[in-house]
Image (spheres, helix red, strand yellow):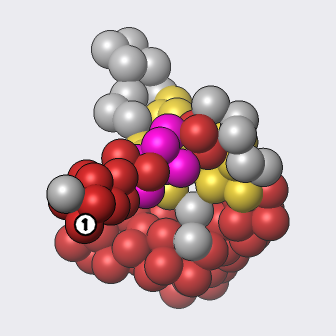
Amino acid sequence: ADNGMGMNDGPPMGMGGGLGNSNGGGRTSSTQVTIPKDLAGAIIGKAGARIRKIRSDSGAGITIDEPLPGSNDRIITITGQVNQIQMAQYLLQQSVHENTNQGGGGGGGRRY
């Protein structure tokens, strides 16, 4: 009977830890970043490859909302510990910079 109790205790404890974090039990927090929707592709990457890499490199949870009707912005929500959020924000900025340096007005202008 003791063994059964121990096994039943395990998963709820684990889940409790996860829930505790989202309720501020850990140092977990979340932040929202608004981006122009035409930059979303730069952040998501081909078939989501870039956003998956940012998630795994930073350890943060990242969700990108669909743009609201009539809006040109998309909201990115980054969830995790403070250092994970900072890392994710840095990687997101890098993605945008890489994308804007490759093409953009300047690059297009020089080709003519």
Front-lying residue, 2 or 50: 2
Three-letter amino acid code of the residue under disc 1? Asn
Magenta segment main secondary structure:
helix
Q: Which residues are magenta?
A: 14-19
As drawn, 34 above or below 44: above
Front-lying residue, 57 or 110: 57
Q: Pick the quarter of the image with the N terminus.
A: bottom left
Image location (x, y in percent) of residue 28: 70, 48
Q: Residue at x 78, y 49 (%)?
A: 27
Residue 91 lies in what quarter of the image?
bottom right
**Image check: 76 left or right of 1?**
right
Q: Residue at x 39, y 35 (%)?
A: 65
Q: Residue at x 33, y 33 (%)?
A: 66
Whether residue 49 is visible here, answered yes or no, is yes
Image location (x, y in percent) of residue 86: 78, 62
Look at the image and say whether residue 17 sits in the magenta stretch. yes
Task: Look at mark 1 in the image and give the residue it sits on.
Answer: 3
As drawn, 68 above or below 76: above
Q: Residue furthest top?
A: 70
Image location (x, y in percent) of residue 43: 48, 64
The secondary element bearing badge 1 is classed as helix
Whether residue 76 is visible here, answered yes or no, is no
Image location (x, y in percent) of residue 51: 43, 69
Residue 2 lies in what quarter of the image?
bottom left
Look at the image and say whether residue 42 sits in the magenta stretch. no
As drawn, 22 above or below 45: above
**Image check: 73 left or right of 82?**
left
Circle 1 packing at 10 Å, graded few (<14), some (14-19), many (20+), is few
Residue 102 lies in what quarter of the image?
bottom right
Q: Residue at x 45, y 19 (%)?
A: 71
